[in-house]
Image: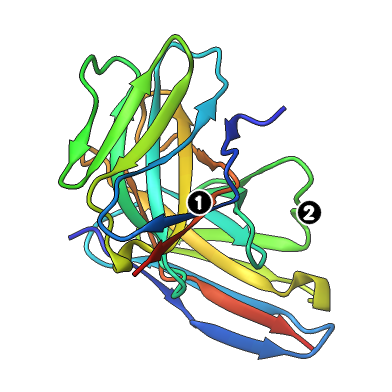
Amino acid sequence: AQKITQTQPGMFVQEKEAVTLDCTYDTSDQSYGLFWYKQPSSGEMIFLIYQGSYDEQNATEGRYSLNFQKARKSANLVISASQLGDSAMYFCAMREGVNRDDKIIFGKGTRLHILP
Amino acid sequence: GAVVSQHPSRVICKSGTSVKIECRSLDFQATTMFWYRQFPKQSLMLMATSNEGSKATYEQGVEKDKFLINHASLTLSTLTVTSAHPEDSSFYICSAPLAGGPHEQFFGPGTRLTVL
């Protein structure tokens, strides 16, 4: 069974609009972390945002926010005021456990296209 | 800080040869590093966890005799693809956590392997 599910293979969004990328996860651990990474066509992995399972408030980093709904096991990424440079592949990922050296597994990703 | 490099960035080799890929943490020590492979337009698949001073931990389905991992020092892990075949052609990317640092893992820029 997939641990990280991203149901949107691709999305097209008009520039300056907000966009929500969906992510659901499956774990029986009480302690875990959720991540979003951006991968442009160059291939580099760019960290966007992190949410710990015990964090009560949704994480925010600039234009990025994570809509964390623990009971639903969802961790959607919201990008406000989208820009052309946001066009990229976006991966949701999970680390089971609290240690920095626990492994991280990735969802299949969502390709986001920002339209001018 | 927390920069990870990989060498080479691209490599082309003949079928049957072995290829070594290096992953270095440039400004921090990493007792643990992770190796992923990524096929075109697909997700990052975790191959193995590289542990300094001990054997690597391989994910299910990954052939440890084919993908040799050596973590010889606190700043270097190597992945050797032995007897490479065209189906091994992929994007290989490593990552490392920063002990006591931010939650995210720091990724190398990746190595594009093409086996002819």
Q: Is residue A91 above or below residue B20?
A: above
Name the residue: 45% across, 32% down.
A95
Relative to residue A35, is residue B7 drawn left or right?
Answer: right
Q: Position of residue B14 (x, y in %)?
A: 78, 90
Q: Position of residue A35 (x, y in %)?
A: 38, 38
Relative to residue A2, is residue B96 drawn left or right?
Answer: left
Q: Is residue B70 visible?
A: yes
Name the residue: 50% across, 51% down.
B34
Between A45 and A86, the one nearer to me in the picture:
A86
Between A1 and B5, the one nearer to me in the picture:
A1
Who comes first in sequence, dot 1 or dot 2? 1
Please tell me how many numbered marks the rendered image carries: 2
Q: Is residue B6 above or below residue B12?
A: above
Tell me the subunit letter for badge 2: B
Question: Distance from label 1 to label 2 (Cα)?
Answer: 15 Å
Question: Which residue lies under the disc numbered 1?
Answer: B34
Amino acid type, mark 1? Phe
The secondary element bearing badge 2 is classed as loop
Q: Is residue B85 visible?
A: no
Label 1 neighbour load within 10 Å: few <14, some 14-19, many 20+: many
Name the residue: 56% across, 39% down.
A6
Q: Position of residue B98 (x, y in %)?
A: 28, 46
Q: Position of residue B69 (x, y in %)?
A: 61, 59
Q: Is residue A70 above or below residue B42?
A: above
Label 2 neighbour load within 10 Å: few <14, some 14-19, many 20+: few
Question: Which residue lies under the disc numbered 2?
Answer: B63
The quadrant in which the N terminus of chain A is found is top right
The quadrant in which the C terminus of chain A is found is bottom left
